[in-house]
Structure formats: C-alpha cells, structure tokens
Amino acid sequence: MTTREKFEELKWAEINAKTDAEREKVLIELGKLADSDPDSFQDVVIASARQTLENAKVLKVKEQLEKVSSIISMSYIAKNYFNKSKSWFSQRLNEFDVNGKPVKFTSDEIETLNFAISDISNKLGSFRVSY
C-alpha cells in the first residue's frame, strides 16, 4: 500500500472514529506513517490539504448560490450572461466530470456570475409596477 493510500485510509478512519481511543489509535498510526517516509508523507498531507481547499471553494460557491437560487433563475443567468445552457451552469456548479475531467467556474466566470447577480439586483431594485 502506498503512503497516499495508507494516509487516505487513516484520514477516513479518523473522520469516522466514534471514540477518543479510536482517534488516538489513528494518530499513532499516522505518526508511524510519517516516520517511515517523511518526504512522501509531507507531499501527501499537502496534496490532501489542497484538495480540501478546492472542495471548500466549490461548496462555498454552491452554498452562496443556494441563498438566491429560489429567487433568481440559474437557467436565466446561464442563458443571458454566459450564453450557455442550464446544464453547462450546473456542471460547473457541481464540478461534474465533462470528457473525463471535473469542470468548475473559472475566476472570470465567477466575476461574470457576480455581475449577473448585481445586474439582476439593480433591475429588480428599479422595477416598479404602475397603473
């Protein structure tokens, strides 16, 4: 078993541990793994942290959009601001695999998304119904 595989196994064991004793046992095993190959262990921990950060970014965007998705149509945003389909938007929002690779919003697309929400907000804020 590679250092990465063992680390992932221990990481999930720690996450799923139900008692302090179970967590302590996992920490001891992690210590042994770190001692057995410090360089590889360091690389694996850094890669895991980076992946966690990326996952958090995706969840953050999705969570933020959930606050307005029942108010504004994501399909409308996809069509009118990106000139794309609702499925294109959903693929990026959920980081689905497209052609074997996960896709996500680029920083330019996040700016476009922020512009879209601001633009819609301005349009709604200036809208008035009259007789």
Image (spheres, rainbow, N blue to C red):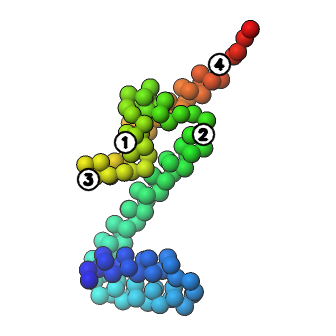
Q: Which residue is mark 2?
A: 70
Earlier-in-chain disc, 1 versus 3: 3
**First in residue order: circle 1 vs circle 4:** 1
Q: Distance from label 1 to label 4 (Cα)? A: 30 Å
Q: Quarter holding the N terminus?
A: bottom left
Q: For the residue marked with disc 3, what is the amino acid?
A: Gly
Select label 2 or label 4 by which is in front.
2
Q: CA distance from mark 1 to mark 3?
A: 18 Å
For the residue carrying disc 4, how many other residues have a C-alpha within 10 Å: few (<14), some (14-19), or many (20+)? few
* Type of the residue with mark 1: Thr
Which label lies toward us, 1 or 3?
A: 3
Q: CA distance from mark 2 to mark 4?
A: 20 Å
* Of pointers 3 and 2, the one earlier in the residue sequence: 2
Look at the picture and state if 74 lies above or below 122: below
Secondary structure, mark 1, is: loop
78 or 22: nearer the eye?
78
- Residue indicated by mark 3: 100
How packed mark 1 is, by other alpha carbons closer than 10 Å (few <14, some 14-19, many 20 or more), is few
Q: Quadrant of the C terminus?
A: top right
In the image, residue 87 above or below residue 116: below
Residue indicated by mark 4:
126
Between the residue at mark 2 and the residue at mark 1, the CA separation in whole angstroms equals 24 Å
> Callout 4, which amino acid?
Ser
Identified at 54% across, 26% down, the residue is 119
Q: Nearer the viewer, residue 63 or 35?
A: 63
> Alpha carbon of mark 3 to alpha carbon of mark 4: how far?
44 Å
Q: Which residue is mark 1?
A: 106
At a point 40% along the width and 40% down the height, the residue shown is 87
Residue nearest the viewer, comparing 10 with 50? 10
Left or right relative to 1: residue 54:
right
Taking the spot 47% from the left edge, 57% from the top edge, the residue there is 56
Tell me where residue 26 appears, x and y as whole percent: 45, 86
